[in-house]
Amino acid sequence: MSVQPQSRLLTKQRFLPYFLTQALGAFNDNVYKNILLILIAFSAPGTLPLDSDLIINLAAGLFILPFFLFSASAGVLADKYDKAQIMRIVKFAEIIIMALAAIAFLTESYMMLLILLFLMGTQSAFFGPAKYALLPQHLKKEELVSGNALVETGTFLAILLGTLLAGVIANQQDAPLIAAISVVTFAVLGYATSRKIPEAKPSNPNIEFKWQPIKQTRHTLIIAKKDKTIFQCVLGISWFWFLGACYLTQFPNFAKIHLGGGAASVSFLLALFSIGIATGSLLCDRLSGHRIEPGIVPLGSFGITLFSAILFFASPDVVPVSNSFIEFIAQPELFHIFIALTLLGVSGGVFIVPLYAMMQSRAKEDERAQIIAANNIWNALFMVASAILSIVFLSVLEFSIPQFFLFLSITNFIVVIYLYVQVPDFFWRFLVWLVTHTMYRVKHKDLENIPRQGGALIVCNHVSYMDALLLAGAYPRPIRFLMDKDISSLPFISVFCKACKVIPVDPNDRRSVHRAFSQVTQYLEDGHIVCIFPEGQLTYDGEIGPFLRGIDIIIKRSSVPVIPVALQGLWGSLFSRKRGSALLKMPKRFWSKVTVVAGEPISPSDKIHSSELRERIVALRGNNQ
């Protein structure tokens, strides 16, 4: 399977216009919203109908309220109609809203600007389901992680640049005029790029749409809960936005009270965090080999826990004095804060991208936009919860902001444990990923021969005790292994085997063999992938030994394709039997090259014999032991 760089997608007509439309939308949202908030905060006394603090909090609520009201309806529409067309309609609506906003800026009509902020939230609520549901239609499955990584990178950089530009505009003498011109210009550019997005045909054109927001919201939330993994992805994404809202809202006071910074220092902290998320998103794509890899998620979550705690421990006891922005960034006692904040963002990017990609790929095509709509509703709920938590923790309980960051670190660690309990595959795939990316340099060849859906029987040579882990990490679908009962019962290994639904077998017990074969057949009929090492033991000389006759029985019973797979480069590793028993010798090589090669699928109608199957695996392995 060829691996293309992420930047290749930015040269494709099926992705670039979409990417630019999304980035321009996020950019313009933040330009408009932050200019409005700054103008309100620094407005002259008597010019506002209400207290400025009340209006600022009201603005935050007005922008997020439409996600509760309209996300469900937007999801149904995105499944029923062409998603690209919906995006164009929404972007055209943005031009109208921004034209009215331009008038409101010029007349300094703050109440009108607040109403238009609600309408901006509304157009974002309708844009979201179409935006994320369109990706799986325009991208290949192996491009989905790269696409999501680029989208998250573009989104957070757009948020950063929009926020910074808003600050620059708001400080100009002709701020209302410049703001009016800017928001209309960016809205027009967003609509222009949306015109180039290729069509995305309706995924469920027969679905009935009725304007029943409350009823539709309940139905949409139920759809998202039907698949446990999808719902866990939704909760994980919502948790990310919960944490993000908690951190971002504290940056101004954190910089001022605890770091001795000014207005420019707040932008600097935001820049570090946003660049970190953008970097983490792209890094996640690299670490996962451009595949959907849930094993990366715990890595990001552990990073969030660690670097959030460092923000607490690295916060200076004595607030440094900085007379300028240059002095602020040059303060040596703040370097740990800057590094931790950047790596916190990196961890967030690593955490979020696989969840988005997995949610999109696992969702049924005719329900994908509705599931994304449900995700948006949950995101909004979690962000509201973050505001409530911040008020309680900082205002009612009167804890400090660094203590709040420590609390978030501890809470996130609890979420990691919850994630393991609810979806142990996430944790075990993390261990598999860790092993296969630290002890070995693993390459994959022709793994597209293994079907993406339905049952399949993988037959592989057996070289080392790491074979099952390497195969489990090589393919994104779960693989069920047939394993010797004595090995599967060992401490720690038994926990892994239980989580991965390993099929134990005692070769000396006929009832155990019969039970194991029946379980293999059942797994295959249920659409799972099962892997068997037909040699029945590790090789003693590096050569592929004779196959036990049980493989012929299993092949005869099954009605699924058989996939011959060969492991290359493992003979001589610490976990093989070269130079003595496995594990009981000094390792002579580290980070060795290992290749997993899949052969052409063998149709169930062929009923291949084990001797011929062995010859195919020998040919696949070649001379590379």
Image (cartoon, helix red, strand yellow):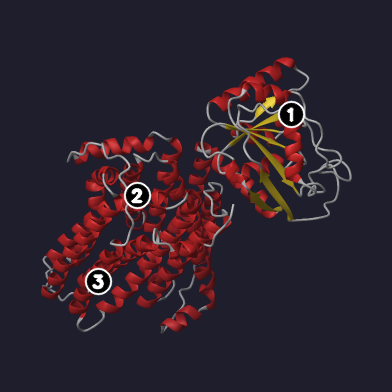
CA separation, marks 2 and 3? 24 Å
Quadrant assignment, res 15: bottom left
Categorize mark 3 by other alpha carbons within 10 Å: few (<14), some (14-19), many (20+).
many
Upstream in sequence: badge 1 or badge 2: 2
Q: Residue at x 50, y 70 (%)?
A: 338
CA separation, marks 1 and 2? 53 Å
Q: In the picture shown, does residue 173 fall above or below 467?
A: below
Q: Residue at x 32, y 57 (%)?
A: 395
* Helix, strand or loop at mark 1: helix
Q: Amino acid under label 2?
A: Asn
Disc 1 to disc 2: CB gap under 8 Å: no
Q: In the picture shown, does residue 20 fall above or below 226?
A: below
From the viewer's perspective, tell me whether residue 263 is left or right of residue 32: right
State which mark lies toward you, 1 or 2: 1
From the image, tell me which residue sits under label 1: 610
From the image, tell me which residue sits under label 2: 379
Q: Residue at x 57, y 23 (%)?
A: 522
